Image (tube, rainbow, N blue to C red):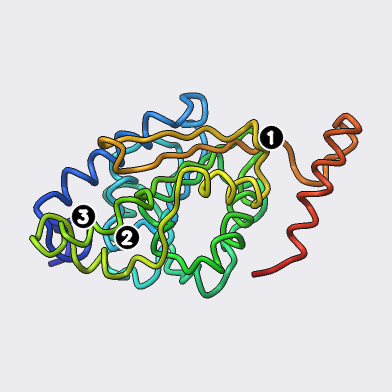
Amino acid sequence: MKGELPGRVTRGEGRLEGYLARRRVARANALVPGELRKGRVLDIGCGFFPYFLTKTDFSEKYGLDKGIDRELREDLRKRHDLALIDVDLECSGRIPFAADFFDVVTMLAVLEHIEPRRVLRIVQEVERVLKPGGVFILTTPPKWTKGLLRYLARINMVSRVEIDEHKAAYSRKQVRAVLEQGGFSRSSIKSGYFELFMNIWARATKEHNRFELEDLTPSESKDRIRRKNLFKKRP
């Protein structure tokens, strides 16, 4: 019914889903630098109900996912002052915003739902739409939890619908490698675990625009040019 918000924050059933969503939101909010909250945030894969965006404070809030109900989009714009965009990013490969537009981009429990061959392109797009000094925050379950999550889905502790759609699993080292290949410098990437090592968090800061080489030292410029060339190789 119009005006009502769904009781679930993910698709499917699972007794732990609400708790896990709250933990992801708490971790993401803790990773956001306070000075960036005056700017814009984009939550990629925000889901049929953008729980994180309703629980975070920014001057402007945007969510992006495929198949978002139009009526819900209108309701959330009125009630929470946030804009939802219906886009299948995995297929389109492009975030529909200008370069240097966002202060923060988040991707919470989404990486594992993307075809591995498309991940690099999406990370490159995140780097493009971030302002210099902006941050990219993501969470994903580590590789070792794959069997455990399937067992928890069978006993209705987590959503089987969500788990069945997992297309890949990553180690912490692999997450950091994807971020670096996508345009973020190694020194700007921080990562760790939460939820008893059952989830990885990572935060990467965009230090410079890719074409602002004149302000870098010669060695930094060579490194930027090397990583810039990655953008010519589309997965």
Q: Residues within 10 Å of mark 1 (few under 14, many from 20)?
A: some
Estimate the spatial distance between the alpha carbons at disc 1 and disc 3, rounded to whole Å. 33 Å
* Residue at the image position 16 percent from the left and 48 percent from the top: 18
Q: Which mark is residue 9?
A: 3
Q: Answer whether residue 145 is visible to the viewer in this image.
A: yes
* Residue at the image position 63 percent from the left and 49 percent from the top: 127
Dot 1: element? loop
Q: Which residue is mark 2?
A: 47
**Going by the image, does 120 lie left or right of 20?**
right
Give the quadrant of residue 161. bottom left
Dot 3: element? loop
Point out the image quarter for the N terminus: bottom left
Q: Are marks 3 and 2 in contact (CB under 8 Å)?
A: yes
In the rendering, at what x and y percent does residue 78 appear? 30, 53
**Going by the image, does 76 lie left or right of 31?**
left
* Residue at the image position 76 percent from the left and 49 percent from the top: 227
Q: Which residue is mark 1?
A: 207
The type of residue carrying mark 3 is Val
Q: Answer whether residue 5 is visible to the viewer in this image.
A: no
**Going by the image, does 36 lie left or right of 8?**
right
User: 113 above or below 54?
Assistant: below
In the rendering, at what x and y percent does residue 184 appear? 65, 42
